[in-house]
Amino acid sequence: MSIRLRLLFSFTGALIVTVLLFALTGYLITVAITGDVRSFSDFYKTHYKLNPLTEAEERIFLELKTLVKTDPGKLMNNELLADYDFQLRMVQAGLYLRKESKLLFISPSLHAPELGAALPNYEMGNNAIRNTFNVGNRFFSYAKYDFTFPDKERGSIFVLRERSPFAEMIRKLLPILIGVLLAVLLLTGVLLFRFITRSIIKPLNGLRHSAERIKEGDLQFEVKAQGNDEIGQLCMAFEDMRRRLTNSVQLQLQYEENRKELLSSISHDLRTPITTIKGYVEGIQDGVADTQEKMDKYLNTIHTKVVGLDRLVDELFLYSKLDLKKLPYSFETVEASRFLEDVIQDLQFDLELRGVHIAGEFPRREIQVLADREKLRRIVLNLIDNCVKYMDKPEKRIVVKLTEHADKATVEIRDNGPGIRPEQLPYIFEKFYRAESRESGKSGSGLGLAIARQLVEGHGGGIWAESEWGEGVSVFFTLKKCGGDES
Ligand SMILES: Nc1ncnc2c1ncn2[C@@H]1O[C@H](COP(=O)(O)OP(=O)(O)OP(=O)(O)O)[C@@H](O)[C@H]1O
Ligand SMILES: [Mg+2]
């Protein structure tokens, strides 16, 4: 059964139970007040008709009836009438005696001059002897007996009792009150039903549609939450799940793409030197290298290619270990200026021989950073290696600069080489990416910066590059200072 149907049933049920309980309460109250176990609807219609008088009044009425039947002439005796009036007054009732249309006696306690006109006419058979009537907004119940005076004139004797105006008002208003109550209950039920349907069923339907779209593989939509209630929170959780699912699918696709690229790059980078080596070895076998000089040249080329392959395999191995996060780091406190100074000094001799001038710019203060020495050295070497490899200016300059910040230190390695085109800049840290075409003559696998990025991230830092095409490149990376916790 749908929630909508269940709600409809429960609201209707609540409505019916309320009305039944209301009717039952009304009935029980009536029974408690009147002691009469008849239906509530009959109460006002017939109660006063059948029992217009109380027991005491009824007794006096019967006495009067017997008197009238046996000796109606006695009713002309005013003293007797006053006596009966007295008895009736004691029980809050009154007496009215009529001869034809003439008033013979009326209890002073009734205080109703227009009463005569409202009283029913003479009726021979005495069929309706008990009933009620109104005089203005006053309500009376009575018992009547019609008879004939000895002089053959028609007489009627009434025992009357005035009912409370409140009871009369209730009698008139009760159907309206019940109608209004039912209408209010019905309206409340309908409004509540609409409210619940809008606030629960609609969002739930939305979620079901979303789940169906996800099942069909469509993740490109947004689940909007209305409000912060349970349903709103459910929508938010659903939207969060959809977003994560989208990200993970995208990541999966990205991984798949990377894997394909990696395979094709590795096969390309392996095949080229292997083809060359194969060609030279076949040349030697075929006796093409007939002089010692040619033989040396062939062997040298083979050696260079094998060294290149060896280096490529080493870098691939290192990169895959970094990628799988299998390379352990042994962090220690390192004084950054001294460390960089040492690296520069180690390289300086070789670089000067190749006409490259390298210089350091360090702050006076000591800067303690958290680093794995060996890996930090590898980062710096990879970056300097690029500066030297791609340098195209006659005056070759490299600057290693260290800057201190609140919780980190930034190392900048700057050269005055050819620079990198802005459109290529975002990709240089990706594995196998080479801005230089593979045919440019500069050897390399495109792993140097990818390895540097993995290592910097392993230190909890960030790496980026800035470049002006034709003017040089600056590669920056950050290191956590000891005690700092942000990169
Ligand atoms: N200092 C630089 N000047 C100019 N271009 C650079 C510089 N550093 C990096 N690049 C460009 O970024 C690309 C990626 O560099 P990366 O170090 O990752 O690979 P590689 O140097 O080609 O190969 P590997 O370092 O693995 O031998 C390079 O191919 C080069 O085009
Ligand atoms: Mg490189």
Image (cartoon, helix red, strand yellow):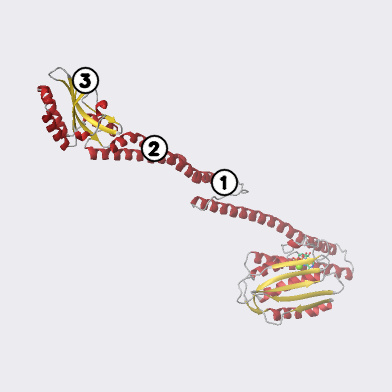
Residue drawn at the location 76% of the way across and 81% of the way down: 345
Which residue position holds label 3?
123
Q: Position of residue 2 (x, y in %)?
A: 46, 40
Looking at the picture, which amino acid does disc 3 mark? Glu
Q: Position of residue 444 (x, y in %)?
A: 77, 66
Which image quadrant is residue 272 in? bottom right
The numbered mark at residue 180 is: 2
- Nearer to us in this view, 291 or 485: 485
Crowding near pointer 1: few (<14 within 10 Å), some, many (20+)?
A: many
Direction from residue 52 to residue 340 in the image, left or right = right
Q: Earlier in the sequence, mark 2 or mark 1?
A: 2
Q: Position of residue 7 (x, y in %)?
A: 44, 41
Which image quadrant is residue 445 in? bottom right
Looking at the picture, which amino acid does disc 1 mark? Ser
Crowding near pointer 3: few (<14 within 10 Å), some, many (20+)?
A: some
- Nearer to us in this view, 356 or 155: 155
Residue drawn at the location 14% of the way across and 35% of the way down: 86
- Nearer to us in this view, 243 or 331: 243
Direction from residue 201 to residue 154 in the image, left or right = left
The C terminus lies in quadrant? bottom right
Q: Is residue 59 visible?
A: no
Depth-wise, is mark 3 or mark 1 nearer the camera? 3
Which image quadrant is residue 436 in? bottom right
